[in-house]
Image (cartoon, helix red, strand yellow):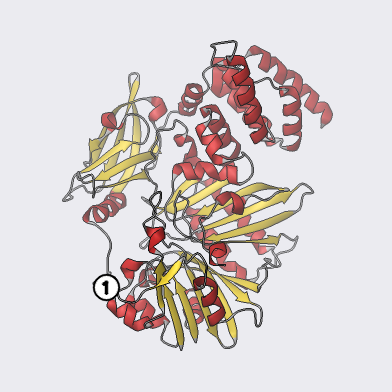
Amino acid sequence: MAEELLKDVMYGDLLNSPGYEVEFAVGLTYSLDLDALISVPMSFGLLGESEEIIHKSPAYLLAAIRKSSDKMAVFCNVGNIKVPKENRLVYPLLENCIFPVRQKGNFHPKLWVIQEVSDEGGRRIRIVVLSRNLTFDDSLDIAVSLTGEVTEKVINRKKYMPVVDLLDWVAKFASPEKRNKVRKVCDSIRCVEKFLVDDPFDDCEFFAFNEKLMGQSDVEDDLQGRDTVVVSPFVDESFLSWLFTKANHKCLITRQNFITSNIFNLVGHGNVFSVNESLLDDEESHIDLHAKMYFVSKNGNNNLYIGSANATQSAFNRNTEFLLKLHFKPYKSSFDKFKEMLLNDEDCIFVPVDTPVADIEKTSTWTQEEIIFKEVVKNVGVAKVIKKGLFYDIVISFKKCDWNLPVKIATLQGPANKSNVTVSKETIISNVALKDISQFYVVTVGTNIETQKSSVVKIETENIPNNRDVVIFQSIVDTENKFINYISFLLSEKPQEFIYDADRQEKLLRQVSDNHDVPVVTTLYEDMLKSITRHPERMKVIEQDIDKFGDKVPNSFKQLLSVFKESLKYLR
């Protein structure tokens, strides 16, 4: 049973709703992987399997982003965008849907709020609560998906308002256009009568908390129970001591290196568990615990809390966190039943710990490089693009730059060895190509490969030339045939079938030709008719793309589009 709750969370299983189309989705995460973000549209059911798209033609990837970036806003902790392994031309096109959140503590929730519309026009809100960040990771995580129908009247259910409060608060970090879309999702949540839960639960409630949001005291009151099971990768003694104050029975499941003598004695022998070493020592991947759960029994009620908050003082007193409270039906669970479900598993995911593992109480896990990195991010100003002949200089201001370790900054795009410069109060990155200009920069602290901290930082960048996107588009789609393939994929309602047909045709044609730029045989007119009749907004995208692709647009397609637009008038 444990593996059904704690597993390698697959976004495709959680975000895809057959029979529904995503109108807008808001994602909240602590850390962010750009390639994982690219995979999200595939998880929405728009573009098939992420691995296929990402490793296929760059034109397909471009179409994927064009098809979905206007429908997403993703908020992450400032400075926590991972440096990608590959340098993809499309990354700058993600600027309009990534918004770092800057606050005193960490922005740490893991949450998706998705507004969907059915083929019949009915709307609903889907809330996916996770312990997983928007990254590719092998750890054990947990996720729950809830849906609620959007009615025509404003209801403002108090137990659902923490979601509205959290989204309304993060919206201020977004661009004006995305801010309005996020707040429209909030309006829809206000009209939800009930979020449905599955057996063995009968009700749910949400908690969002930081220094600006309400709800923290309610969580604290709820979490102190008579019988408590804590599942958390990171713990500290002071918080656990408070949490277990009223507990007659207690159980802790955590990572081995957090089990100190004091924590071991606090919980008691036979009540402390960690991940089986066979999973930790797996040759292919290191699998450890990352899920956060609190089972609390008190006053005759059994509740399960799932979300982002670790069992630490920082989580409940400094960070922005989100928890879902699920209420068990009467007689459906108990301390012993829940503990048995997690621990009496034939695969032995968790095993008892007989002695303390960690030597000292962990008060801080920050390295010097990470501490300085936080200071660098805090002191970064704005960037400005200046044209210098055929290339560009980027001038980045810093409020201060007197750190104990070397700090360098580079553009995310382009060869790092050419743009990697030492940070000063007025840092200049010279000779940047237009296609390599973006608001994403790589900041690196330290020179020791084993300890240096390197991450992507989004910096407000002024004067980015208006034709930057045009250059990126034309660098990816550089022939007429690629343009036709791009448009065909963009309009395809069944991208998986399109890719299969494209691959099959390409293999057949390569048997008789060395030409690798093979056009897909497509019923483009029919595809346009079907797609734009159902999604009128795609006509605007196609018209914009004609300008971006310039002379790569075949005259035959321009003529086809002219005929199509006339036909569309009659259809409307």
Q: Is residue 380 left or right of residue 272?
A: left
Q: Which amino acid does label 1 sit on?
A: Glu
Which residue appears at 48% of the width and 77% of the height? 229
Residue where numbered disc 1 is placed = 361
Please state the horizontal and vertical placement of residue 288, each as a whole percent of the image.
Answer: 41, 60
Q: Quadrant of the C terminus?
A: top right
The relative height of residue 473 versus residue 335 in the rendered view (above or below) is above
Locate residue 103, reporting x and y percent: 38, 59
Does residue 353 show up? yes
Residue drawn at 53 percent across, 67 percent down:
2
Q: In which quarter of the image is residue 406?
A: top left
x then y, percent, for residue 69: 56, 40
Q: Depth check: 347 or 150 in front?
A: 347
The residue shown at (68%, 19%) is 521
Residue 476 pos. (x, y %):
49, 24
Left or right, 501 with reference to 262: right
Is residue 180 among the parts visible in the rendering? no
Q: Kindly identify the residue that appears in the image at 44 percent across and 51 percent down.
A: 137
Quadrant housing residue 503: top right
Q: How crowded is mark 1: few (under 14 residues within 10 Å), some or many (20 or more)?
A: some
Nearer the observer, 187 or 492: 492
Viewport quadrant of the N terminus: bottom right
